Image (cartoon, rainbow, N blue to C red):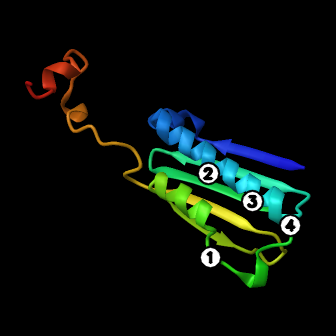
Amino acid sequence: DYEFSCSGQEHLGRFSARRLMDLLLFHKESLINILRHADASRVKIDLQVSRHGLTLVIADNGSGLKDSQTNVPASIKRRAGLLRGRAMVNQPGGGGTRIELQMRRGWRRYLPWRKHVSDTESVSSKLPAS
């Protein structure tokens, strides 16, 4: 059984195709770990996107991490690094595992000329000459 919620999906267009693919692969890697190791019967996925960043939380009701381990698995850490984000793993009091990916300000490429371009000017007129 699973539950998925998403807020701010209109801001996903700020991501490059590559960044969206990396986000999908982070999500997939997390679900694969749950299927292989957690013996969970329920997964809850919450994606919140704003102009200030992104938070993805994936929580399950499975067996939790071994020996109260709270280290982020290497595969998850690597995927978070590709996204220039931060991954955290913890075990809620009710059992299971909670994986959280946070990406804050600066998660999109800055385009310095954008703030100087009026509606009537073209972007190419603001680019340096080659």
**What residue is disc 2 on?**
26
The correct choice, above or below, for 54 with respect to 68 in the image is above
The correct choice, above or below, for 33 with respect to 115 in the image is below
Q: Are marks 4 and 1 in contact (CB under 8 Å)?
A: no
Residue type at mark 2 is Phe
Residue type at mark 1 is Asn
Q: CA distance from mark 2 to mark 3?
A: 11 Å
- Name the residue nearer the viewer: 51 or 60: 60
Residue count near mark 2 (Cα–Cα under 10 Å), binned few <14, some 14–19, many ≥20: many
The correct choice, above or below, for 33 with respect to 19 in the image is below
In this image, 55 relative to 43: left or right?
A: left
Of callouts 1 and 3, the N-terminal one = 3
**What residue is disc 1 on?**
71
State the SS at label 1. Answer: loop
Of callouts 2 and 3, the N-terminal one = 2
Q: Residue at x 53, y 60 (%)?
A: 78
In the image, farthest residue toward the left: 129
**What residue is disc 3 on?**
33
Q: Are marks 4 and 3 in contact (CB under 8 Å)?
A: no
Residue type at mark 3 is Asn
Of callouts 4 and 3, the N-terminal one = 3
Residue count near mark 1 (Cα–Cα under 10 Å), binned few <14, some 14–19, many ≥20: few
Picture coordinates of residue 53, whole percent (x, y): 48, 51
Of callouts 4 and 1, the N-terminal one = 4
Of callouts 4 and 2, the N-terminal one = 2
Residue type at mark 4 is Gly
Q: CA distance from mark 1 to mark 3?
A: 14 Å
Picture coordinates of residue 8, whole percent (x, y): 58, 40
